[in-house]
Image (cartoon, rainbow, N blue to C red):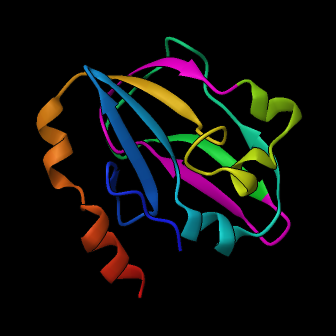
Amino acid sequence: MNVPANLKYTSDHEWIRVEGDIATIGVTDYAQGELGDVVFVELPDVGDEFAKGDVAATIEAVKTVADVILPVSGSIEAVNEALDDASELINQDAYGQGWIIKVKISDVSELNDYMSAEDYTASIS
């Protein structure tokens, strides 16, 4: 199971990479494996505002449909438009080309709530 050490993780199996005040968010390798083949991703619009815990996107897979719960409050800075034509990028490269959204963080203290790679690995073992 791939769990990069430089990311933070939620109990909802999302990863967060923070650069300045921008958080890039996707689902973990474990989550994409549990979902199975991803067939569609419904993305928010750039500029949309969300609070921590809001559903920001939806992933439709062969097995199920899953919500992407926003782990931080803020506004959508970018969405991965490549997923419109190639939603399988989530399965193929969950931590790279399969990123889902970028959020301008409004409260960086919310990042303190999330797990390190070591803690996340323990939680899925």
Could you tell me which residue is drawn at 42 percent across and 51 percent down?
15
The relative height of residue 76 versus residue 2 in the rendered view (above or below) is above
Confirm whether the magenta stretch covers residue 34. Answer: no
Find residue 23 and report its image quarter: top left
Find residue 79 and report its image quarter: top right
Could you tell me which residue is drawn at 66 percent across and 31 percent down?
43
The relative height of residue 102 versus residue 62 in the rendered view (above or below) is above
Overall secondary structure of the magenta stretch? strand
Seen from the viewer's position, the closer of residues 94 and 110 is 94
Find residue 61 and report its image quarter: bottom right
In the rendered picture of this protein, how many numbered marks are placed on residues? 0
The relative height of residue 20 versus residue 70 in the rendered view (above or below) is above
Q: Position of residue 105 (x, y in %)?
A: 28, 24
Residue at the farthest top position: 47
Region in magenta: 61-80
Q: Position of residue 62 (x, y in %)?
A: 86, 66
Could you tell me which residue is drawn at 24 percent across and 61 percent down?
116
Seen from the viewer's position, the closer of residues 96 and 49 is 96
117 to the left or right of 88: left
Seen from the viewer's position, the closer of residues 37 and 1 is 1
The relative height of residue 91 versus residue 40 in the rendered view (above or below) is below
125 to the left or right of 33: left
Could you tell me which residue is drawn at 37 percent across and 39 percent down?
17
| Quadrant (top left/top right/bottom left/bottom right) for the C terminus | bottom left
Confirm whether the magenta stretch covers residue 73. Answer: yes
Q: Position of residue 11 (x, y in %)?
A: 36, 66
21 to the left or right of 45: left
Residue at the farthest bottom position: 125
Q: Position of residue 20 (x, y in %)?
A: 25, 20
